Amino acid sequence: MWATIKEMATSKKFIVMVGGLLVAGGSALTGQLEVTSALQAGLVLVLTYLGVQGIADFGKSSAKITSAKITTDTTTTDTK
């Protein structure tokens, strides 16, 4: 579990999302942006991160399934 959290925290996508959340939060705190707009921006950042991460993981899981099928396919055909 800790390895997954460490991997996620060092991901470029995660760092960009956290940076965007900090910018939106800072803008709301200084009055440059309304709080509702900052919340919307934060929600968009989080949902975008989750969507992109899901797309990236989709390719990884299909590759794992394909490699698992190749390595576990030990059926032999009788050629007599």
Image (cartoon, helix red, strand yellow):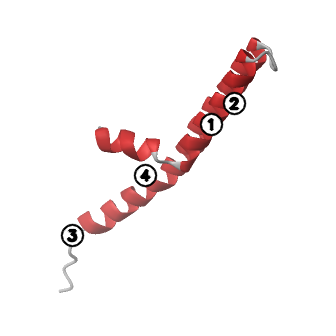
Q: State the CA–CA distance, disc 4 to disc 1.
A: 28 Å
The location of residue 11, given as percent across then percent down, is 50, 48
Q: Determine crowd level at label 2: few under 14, some 14-19, many 20+ residues with C-alpha closer than 10 A.
A: some
Q: Which residue is mark 4?
A: 61
Question: 18 or 40: nearer the eye?
Answer: 18
Q: In the rendered view, would you say 48 is above or below 66?
A: above
Q: State the CA–CA distance, disc 4 to disc 3.
A: 22 Å
Amino acid at the residue labelled 1: Gly
Q: State the CA–CA distance, disc 1 to disc 2.
A: 6 Å
The location of residue 68, given as percent across then percent down, is 31, 60
Q: Residue at x 45, y 41 (%)?
A: 9
Q: In the rendered view, would you say 80 is above or below 2?
A: below
Quarter of the picture holding the N terminus: top left
Q: State the CA–CA distance, disc 4 to disc 2.
A: 33 Å
Residues at circles 3 and 1 in contact by the CB criterion of under 8 Å:
no
Q: Which residue is mark 3?
A: 74
Question: 51 or 5: nearer the eye?
Answer: 5
Q: Earlier in the sequence, mark 4 or mark 3?
A: 4
Residue 23 — which label? 2
Q: Earlier in the sequence, mark 4 or mark 1?
A: 1
Quarter of the picture holding the C terminus: bottom left
The location of residue 29, given as percent across then percent down, is 71, 16
Which of the 4 image quadrants contains residue 34?
top right
Q: Earlier in the sequence, mark 3 or mark 1?
A: 1
Residue at the bottom extreme of this rendering? 80
Residues at circles 1 and 2 in contact by the CB criterion of under 8 Å:
yes
Q: Earlier in the sequence, mark 4 or mark 2?
A: 2
Q: Which residue is mark 1?
A: 19
Q: Earlier in the sequence, mark 2 or mark 3?
A: 2
Question: 80 or 9: nearer the eye?
Answer: 9
Q: State the CA–CA distance, disc 2 to disc 3.
A: 54 Å
Front tag of 4 and 1: 1
